[in-house]
């Protein structure tokens, strides 16, 4: 069995839904995980925000607009009057449910229920279409088996047990449809996975069902060696290790969330990143395999703040760094990069919410300097073999760029450099020209 996840753009219109149905219509056993139709979650977030502000008239207008959009999808998706009627009745049921929140107190619990409507709608409409096309399939409600615990982490034992029970109800079925992103929390309320969303769902489901492969279908033909929105002449990477993919995702590759492949890695299940617009494209395969001594890709993470603490108390002192880290721990602020010298420590954070309080406490240790509008450039590959000359290629490419910090050696898969955000486009372009060998690209 395989798990196939399709993102919002892949099911973003009646035309795209029909293409997905055609793509999955074969005899391979599979679980298909769907996101909400593109634009739906943003619209639901906007509706929730107006409900929080008690702007009920505005909320009703937004609900009506989204309902109208879905009515148009129904008109384009189905050919039979029976299915159109069934689908429109479903829409009325769901949107009346959302409208009911304009009559009562709106809290975070209601917000999560509102946000879940996108996935519930996309899967139900898709299932109706499969029925109309006489494709044998079963809709599995994710809320029957997907659960997070009190720490908001996936309850993997619960997921595996209840998913197995759901699948066993339909022993002769090869095609299952379910929702990504949504789940129940430890109290049985509707909630969501937050980090990684539907990709995380696909990986958790794949691990729970011990599938042979997980496929993530988007509108991009795999993970690229550089940011195609900024740099020309990028190309999809044929193969990445789990660690390389996680590094790229964490440091800015938008196609994947860093948490989303962890369950697959733990079960050693290959993950393929594929393109619904070009299903014949090879895409990217993420697995435990790694090709050593090569630079695979570059990613950039914006919104970085650099903090330097300079203090004579550091010299020959133990416990100094622990005291510094405890400040960030108190404010639940993760650190991305860190470098040290005899009398100074420099580090970066990507969440400046508590910056003022953090700096105030750090000043007790010494002089503090803060630089904002910074970007981390992450170069990913397998650098355990120095014979590749990776460092030389990188620094020659960036010889005209001012580098604020360098992190090298903390991971065999990552060299990170901190630069001013204003230099990002030039840095990514120079690296694209200087470190990649197009002759070795086999994507």
Image (cartoon, grey):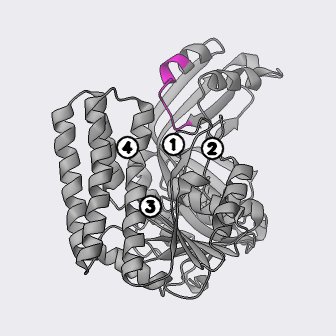
Q: Which residue is mark 3?
A: 35
Write the start and end of the magenta stretch as one range. Answer: 349-357
Q: Is residue 353 found inside the magenta-colored segment of the image? A: yes
Mark toward the viewer: 3 or 4 = 4
Q: Are marks 2 and 4 in contact (CB under 8 Å)?
A: no
> Please, is residue 289 above or below residue 255 in the view?
below
Q: Bin the neighbour count of mark 3 within 10 Å (Cα to Cα): few under 14, some 14-19, many 20 and up.
A: many
Q: Secondary structure at mark 4?
A: helix
Q: Which residue is mark 1?
A: 191
Report how far apart the C-alphas of labels 4 and 1 lie in the structure.
Answer: 10 Å
The quadrant of the image that shows the C terminus is bottom right
Q: Viewer-proximal residue, 389 or 205?
A: 205
Mark 3 vs 1, N-terminal side: 3
Q: Secondary structure at mark 1?
A: strand
Q: Bin the neighbour count of mark 2 within 10 Å (Cα to Cα): few under 14, some 14-19, many 20 and up.
A: many
Mark 2 vs 1, N-terminal side: 2
Indicate the position of residue 244 as horizontal and vertical percent values.
Answer: 66, 62
Which quadrant would residue 331 be assigned to in this image? top right
Indicate the position of residue 173 as horizontal and vertical percent values.
Answer: 60, 78
Residue at figure coordinates x 33%, y 49% from the top left? 42
Q: Which residue is mark 4?
A: 114
Mark 3 vs 4, N-terminal side: 3
């Amino acid at each position: 069995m395989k798990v196939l996840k399709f993102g919002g753009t892949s099911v973003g219109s009646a035309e795209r839904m029909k293409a997905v149905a055609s793509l999955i219509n074969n005899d391979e056993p599979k679980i298909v995980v769907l996101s909400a139709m593109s634009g739906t979650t943003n619209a639901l977030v906007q509706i929730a925000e107006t409900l929080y502000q008690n702007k009920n008239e505005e909320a009703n207008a937004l609900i009506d607009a989204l309902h109208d959009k879905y009515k148009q999808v129904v008109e384009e998706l189905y050919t039979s009057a029976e299915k159109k009627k069934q689908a429109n009745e479903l829409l009325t049921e769901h949107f009346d449910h959302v409208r009911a929140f304009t009559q009562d107190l709106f809290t975070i619990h209601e917000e999560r229920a509102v946000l879940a409507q996108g996935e519930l709608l996309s899967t139900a409409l898709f299932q109706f279409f499969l029925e109309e096309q006489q494709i044998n399939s079963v809709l599995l409600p994710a809320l029957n088996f997907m659960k997070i615990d009190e720490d908001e982490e996936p309850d993997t034992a619960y997921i595996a047990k209840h998913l197995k029970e759901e699948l066993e109800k339909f022993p002769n079925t090869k095609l299952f449809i379910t929702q990504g992103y949504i789940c129940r929390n430890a109290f049985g309320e509707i909630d969501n996975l937050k980090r990684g969303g539907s990709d995380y769902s696909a990986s958790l489901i794949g691990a729970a069902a011990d599938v042979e492969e997980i496929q993530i279908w988007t509108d991009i033909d795999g993970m690229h060696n550089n940011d195609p929105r900024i740099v020309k002449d990028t190309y999809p990477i044929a193969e990445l290790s789990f660690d390389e993919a996680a590094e790229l995702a964490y440091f800015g590759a938008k196609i994947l969330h860093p948490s989303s492949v962890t369950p697959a890695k733990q079960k050693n299940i290959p993950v393929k990143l594929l393109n619904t617009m070009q299903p014949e494209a090879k895409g990217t395969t993420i697995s435990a395999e790694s090709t050593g001594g090569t630079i695979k890709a570059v990613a950039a993470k914006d919104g970085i703040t650099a903090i330097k603490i300079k203090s004579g108390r550091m010299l020959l002192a133990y416990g100094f760094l622990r005291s510094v880290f405890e400040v960030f721990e108190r404010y639940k602020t993760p650190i991305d990069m860190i470098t040290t010298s005899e009398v100074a420590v420099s580090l970066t954070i990507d969440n400046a919410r508590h910056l003022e309080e953090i700096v105030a406490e750090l000043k007790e240790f010494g002089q503090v300097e803060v630089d904002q509008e910074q970007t981390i450039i992450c170069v990913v590959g397998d650098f355990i073999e120095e014979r590749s000359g990776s460092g030389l290629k990188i620094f020659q490419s960036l010889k005209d760029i001012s580098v604020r910090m360098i992190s090298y050696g903390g991971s065999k898969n990552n060299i990170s450099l901190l630069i001013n955000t204003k230099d990002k486009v030039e840095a990514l372009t120079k690296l694209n020209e200087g470190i990649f060998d197009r002759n070795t690209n086999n994507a």
